[in-house]
Amino acid sequence: MPKLPTAPATMLVSLALVASLSVAAKAAVTEDNFKLQSAGDLAALCSADKTDPLATAAANFCEGYALGAYAVIDQYQRAEKTPLFCLPNPPPTRDAATAAYAAWVKASPARPAMAPVDSVYEFLRTQYPCTAKKP
């Protein structure tokens, strides 16, 4: 019969398992993420670890896409009688907004499969609801 590991050995194995899971949760950005097939791809780019070899490209892509999507959604909103979302004053910084977006996508199992632009719209609508009607 094999000898069972002692408590300290079991603890080390457990810690190693937890550490490996946290690394897996923060997966590296891949070139496929830049194809932007889903909100999950955009969230991965927006939350790339600064040590990732593609971190700079990911951050630039994320911010560029987010700004473009926001500009289109904001123009659409201006044509509506009631606002679709209302940013606070002052609005969040780009880094804060993209980090919040990535966390929002990852918080729901259904959101990573959304179309990227639809997810940006839903994020804005749900995270920055309006309390007053547009004049």
Image (cartoon, helix red, strand yellow):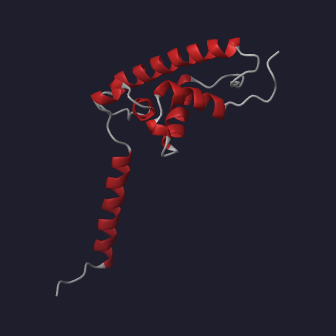
Residue drawn where x is 42% and y is 35% of the image: 40
Q: Is residue 85 left or right of residue 31?
A: right
Residue drawn where x is 32% and y is 60% of the image: 17
The N terminus - image quarter? bottom left
Pinpoint residue 116: horizontal percent, then vertical percent. 47, 27
Q: Is residue 32 left or right of residue 118?
A: left
- List the single residue furthest toward the bottom: 1
Q: Nearer the viewer, residue 106 or 109?
A: 109
Pinpoint residue 21: horizontal percent, then vertical percent. 35, 54
Q: With respect to residue 76, does 47 lie above or below?
A: below
Q: Quadrant of residue 133?
A: top right
Q: With respect to residue 1, does 83 lie above or below?
A: above
Residue drawn where x is 39% and y is 33% of the image: 48
- List the single residue furthest toward the left: 1
Q: Quadrant of residue 76?
A: top right
Pinpoint residue 100: horizontal percent, then vertical percent. 55, 34
Q: Quadrant of residue 57?
A: top left
Q: Is residue 27 left or right of residue 132?
A: left
Pinpoint residue 67: horizontal percent, then vertical percent. 52, 17
Residue drawn where x is 76% and y is 20% of the image: 82
The C terminus - image quarter? top right
The total of numbered circles placed on residues is 0
Q: With respect to residue 12, does 72 lie above or below?
A: above
